[in-house]
Amino acid sequence: MRRAKITAAIFLMLAMIFSLSACAGGEGGDQQKTTTLTVFNWGDYIDETVLEDFEKEYDVKVNYTYFATNEEMYVKLKSGGTNYDVIFPSDYMIARLIKEDMLHKIDMSKITNYHHIGDEFKNLDYDPNNEYSVPYMWGTLGIVYNTTMVDDPVDSWEILWNPKYEKQIFMLDSQRDSIAVALKKLGFSLNTRNEAELEAAKQELIKQRPLVLSYVGDEVKDKMVGGEAALAVVWSGDAVAMKWENEDLAYSIPKEGSNLWFDAMVIPKTSQNKEAAELFINFMTDPEIALRNAEYIGYSTPNITAWEMLDEEIKYDEDAYPALDSLDNCEVFEDVSDIIATYNRIWDEIKAAQ
Amino acid sequence: MKRQWLASPYIVWMIMFIVVPMLLVLFYSVTEQTADGYRFTFDHFRRFVDPIYINVLFRSVALALISTVICLLLGYPMAAILASKEYSRKKILYMLIVLPMWMNILLRTYAWMTLLERNGIINTILSFLRLPPLDILYTNKAVVLGMVYNFLPFMILPIYSVLSKIDESVIEAAQDLGGNSFTVFRRVIFPLSLPGVMSGITMVFMPAVTTFVISRLLGGGQFTLIGNLIEQQFLSSGDWGFGSALSVIMMLLILASMGIMSKYEQEGGGGALW
């Protein structure tokens, strides 16, 4: 018994020493041969075989990591000790990162595929001169519902407060999105800075708590496809992917208006390999690659050339590619970091309430 | 010969990774960042006094207590069976208790999600047997189930290790003196096993009261426990001050419960788990 313990201890120590030296050796060795590119993206937001192709083509090792919300991404980046080279934040978060001087300007002459991006996705408010970001995907926020379980028309956020669907509703575990749902239902702007309006939104979401089955993240896709609930607040791309898996599902953008969003690729100041990062961004903007990503994840590509090559069925799917001028009552999130403490507090209280 | 110097790497390790971080937590909990450095403040603790947050604390303690009681009721008989001399399949049973602990808690909890879903495995079997479906995922029942499942071995093993060390002759003496089996249990075995029970209670209660994985996966954000609240401060709100204050409150709670427990715990009793 005693001997076994000592053997185990020695084994453990050896394992630790080896793994430490392996780390040190690995890094030193790798840097001489190839560069390592650290990419920080949303979970389930890429066709990962694309990364292998990039590695092969440019002899760069990609270290791919995930986040679940913009807020989580921001906290990780801000707390330091990271060396991300490319990140995929959304509009309002890009505006905040620019404001806080956390992004490199991208050398646009290196992004030779940039002309494939549709003009309507360039020079948007979050990055007016398109110096810091290259669009990756875009979409809306709406309700995905199971037509076999919902017989009322799904055209308003009100349905998420209908007691008939008690414990049949999934909400999105994302601060800005869930608060936006309540704000829009109440007829307020989803970029409000008015404390009273935010307080009202909070009360609305707390009132809704007994009807909600769960606040979820990416698992909502499996759950809705499996028929676990009737209604879920989701991003349009996820809805499209869900419709591929289960024909009973449909997507709707409520008439009160919703959120129109853009996710783009940026290079944070933590990047050690700005040139490799630009290579990667250009690679991702290549129409063939953009097409593969769009086909794999279901989200809508701003890459016009890639869009042209899509299957007819997806290409003219109103849920995936609505005409931008039909989204008049939709708003793009603006950076509200000046009153972020209020947003955080409200979100904490919604989650903590019961 | 005592080789106390062998402990020195551990002491360095403890200072670096336990003492210093705890001091940092304490520091963040009573300060606030301003334009020119840090300022002393009790705001973070004052914010906690809001009924919403107090309720979260109560909920965490209540769910952890319920889980601990269920673990004790299930775990004690199990430990007694394991420790009994007559039982021949002891090794297999012991393996079965320890085996799940080889797997990561996250994976085990995810597995429960698929089991408990409305159209999950358990409900498929129930509907096949024409029994009413079980709709407990995303309720406090599921959270308690997850806690009991994950922490039960921490109750069984300390009790087992104490029970198996009880001197057989003590029990025989009690029987010789005319005690029936219930009296022997009540007057001899149970009091002797108390250190194990106390150690088991501590080892179940502490992880249960601080968990955030189980409540998030099985409670689905409906049952925010103090662990979830702390996680949210550090991972999404970025409010280190409030997060640290919550952690300090949590640590005080654990310290208090350990203080109570250690009164009953004897030196070395039940410590044989590791």
Image (spheres, rainbow, N blue to C red):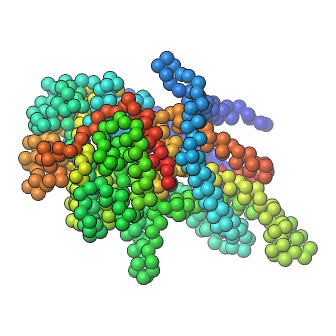
Q: Position of A135 compared to A14: left or right?
A: left
Instruction: Using the image, determine if residue A162 lies above or below residue A90.
Output: below
Instruction: Using the image, determine if residue A298 lies above or below residue B251.
Output: below
- One can see residue B36 in this view: yes
Residue visible at 60% across and 51% down in the picture: B58
Q: Position of B145 compared to A189: left or right?
A: right
Q: Quadrant of the N terminus of chain A?
A: bottom right
- One can see residue A55 in this view: no
Tally of numbered tags: 0
Residue visible at 77% across and 61% down in the picture: B193
Instruction: Using the image, determine if residue A41 lies above or below residue A156.
Output: above
Q: Position of residue B8 (x, y in %)?
A: 67, 31
Quarter of the rendering containing residue B155: bottom right
Residue visible at 34% across and 24% down in the picture: A100
Q: Position of residue B227 (x, y in %)?
A: 54, 46
Q: Position of residue A243 (x, y in %)?
A: 22, 60
Residue furthest right as drawn: B177
Q: Position of A322 compared to B225: left or right?
A: left
Nearer to the camera, A335 or A272? A335
Instruction: Using the image, determine if residue B196 lies above or below residue B173.
Output: above
Residue visible at 23% across and 57% down in the picture: A155
Nearer to the camera, A162 or B104? A162
Q: Position of A253 compared to A26: left or right?
A: left
Residue furthest bottom as drawn: B130
Q: Position of residue B127 (x, y in %)?
A: 41, 78
